[in-house]
Amino acid sequence: MLTYSVPLNEKKTFIRWFLKNFQLKRREGVWILNYLLSNDDLLEHVHFVDEAHYCPRAIVMSTVDTTSIPFRFYKDNIMTSDAEKAFHDLRLNTSEEIYFQLNFPSIPPDPLYLAVLEENPYVPELFIPEKDRIAAQQLLENSVLAFQEQLLLKQIDEALDAGDKERFFELSNLLQALKHTK
């Protein structure tokens, strides 16, 4: 299903960088990542993706400086926060594809992370990540507020030109209220 395979050395470089620069919420995550470094056969089948919970076999881990869940292991329709079960599954099934999602502060994304990040083949086509949905919603709200502000300013100018004090004060109050919603 995947068309591109990230070279092992890039995966290892990324994992080492990640372990050096971030602290995971669960120490078992460090053990799992170190195990990946020591097992090339398994690492060949590791894919770093976003939205890993859609994958048939996945691990999600988060660093202490995020609000994301500490640890999740997904296999078929089962989900657990038991890292030992995940580790046991990794050891027993080294030739099965496994997808990792690492939640860590990555803005802007580090080139080492981008080098290993793959497209998740299991994400539904119409899926929009939560962070993108929130950003789009904020952009839309800001655009609407900016449009409303420009419209009110134009109407205030027209009220001034017409000498309509009552309309001027009404529109000015609306403008002030609009600015307080920003």
Image: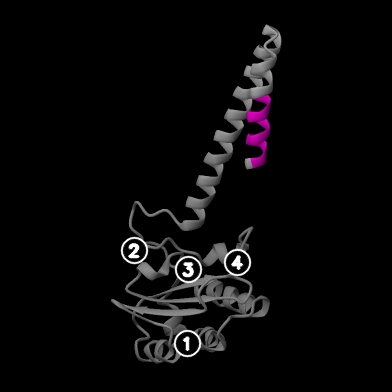
Q: How crowded is mark 2: few (under 14 residues within 10 Å), some or many (20 or more)?
A: few
Q: Residues within 10 Å of mark 1 (few under 14, many from 20)?
A: few
Q: Residues within 10 Å of mark 4 (few under 14, many from 20)?
A: some
Q: Is residue 111 visible?
A: yes
Disc 1 to disc 3: CB gap under 8 Å: no
Type of the residue with mark 3: Val
Type of the residue with mark 1: Asn
Q: Is residue 103 located in the magenta-colored stretch of the structure?
A: no
Alpha carbon separation for disc pair 4 and 1: 20 Å
- Residue behind mark 4: 112
- Residue behind mark 1: 39
| Sequence-earlier tag: 4 or 2 | 4
Alpha carbon separation for disc pair 1 and 3: 15 Å
Circle 1 sits in a helix, a strand or a loop, which is it? loop
| Sequence-earlier tag: 4 or 1 | 1
Marks 3, 2: nearer the viewer: 2
The numbered disc on residue 6 is 3
Write the start and end of the magenta stretch as one range.
171-180
- 59 vs 145: above or below: below
Alpha carbon separation for disc pair 1 and 2: 25 Å
